[in-house]
Amino acid sequence: MFIKPDEIPDEVESVLESLPDEEVEVVISPDMDLNMISSKIKITTNLTLKHVQKLSDIDMQERAFEQIEEAKDAIKDAEEKVEKYNVTNGATRLLEEAKKHLNTSVDAYHNESYGLAYGQAVSAESLAENAERFAEHEGEGKNRPDAASEAIRKAGHEIDEAEEALGEISTPLPRAEKHLAEAKEYLESAKDTYDEGDYGKAFADARTAKRLAQNAVEAAKDAQKRMHVQLTLSQKKNGRDKMEIDVEGNDSGGKLAAHDGNSDDEKEKDDAESGDEEDTTTTTSAFGSTTTTLMMQGANNTM
């Protein structure tokens, strides 16, 4: 989880409170206000810091330098593929974007803004790798109407699957819906360019449509898994405290319960006397580890 250097979002606090851990391990960046974060963690969650690993300026400088070199290599590979397949569509646009991010990264590095340099270099590498894939896909489909036609068919199938998946979810999914809308636009473009005889562009647009439709499905799944934790504390008739954590949007439907420490026999006796049915709660949580690690980055990073 990425949070601001001097703030713990409510969502993070809720998740921490729901865990059975007593300690939290924190990894921080050089600009983080450790004292403020430590005190907030203790006050809001009753957790204590196990140990803290701090990323030094030297560590960040080395990571930024290495990432810049990796981005340069990725851009070089992408340039070779674009030249090999002689493509001028999406691949070249992605390649230009990659170079812009690399230039920003290098400038930030020279200004000793190593966190920014690292992030921009990561973006440059990712864009360059996508450009390389686009060049390969477009090159494969160039002058091959059969490949373009098959790509359009597969894209249409993926879009149908995405529409069905989103239709089963009642809550708004803006990110998934955006991906799906873009997928449909690319599919229409693929069909139009296919009819015009530009099979290479049709192939590339169809592959983009397919990828966006898949992204829509993944975004929908992520939204379902995102937990909205609601804590309620109720007092039982027999004096036992019970904390229930309802996890919405989770297919497994986890519930955590905490009791006052009475033995099972005593609880059964109390339940029998009070006429309550036995309340058996199974601990189910997406967080299986006994130690929670929070990755805290710079001020520009949020959850």
Image (cartoon, rainbow, N blue to C red):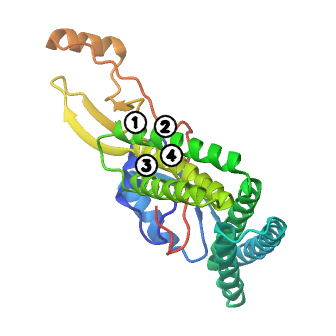
215 or 188: which is nearer to us?
A: 188
Lateral position of residue 19 relative to residue 275, left or right: right
Lateral position of residue 108 relative to residue 82, left or right: left
Marks 1 and 2, the one that precedes in the sequence: 1
64 or 54: which is nearer to us?
A: 64
Looking at numbered disc 3 in the image, what kind of residue is underneath it?
A: Leu
Tell me the residue that label 3 is attached to: 16
- Give residue 271's position: percent from left, percent from top: 22, 13
In whole angstroms, how far apart are the C-alphas of marks 4 and 3? 25 Å
Marks 3 and 2, the one that precedes in the sequence: 3
Between disc 3 and disc 1, the foreground one is 1
**Marks 1 and 2: CB-CB under 8 Å?**
yes
Looking at numbered disc 2 in the image, what kind of residue is underneath it?
A: Ala
Tell me the residue that label 2 is attached to: 286
12 or 41: which is nearer to us?
A: 12
- Is 287 situated above or below 73? above
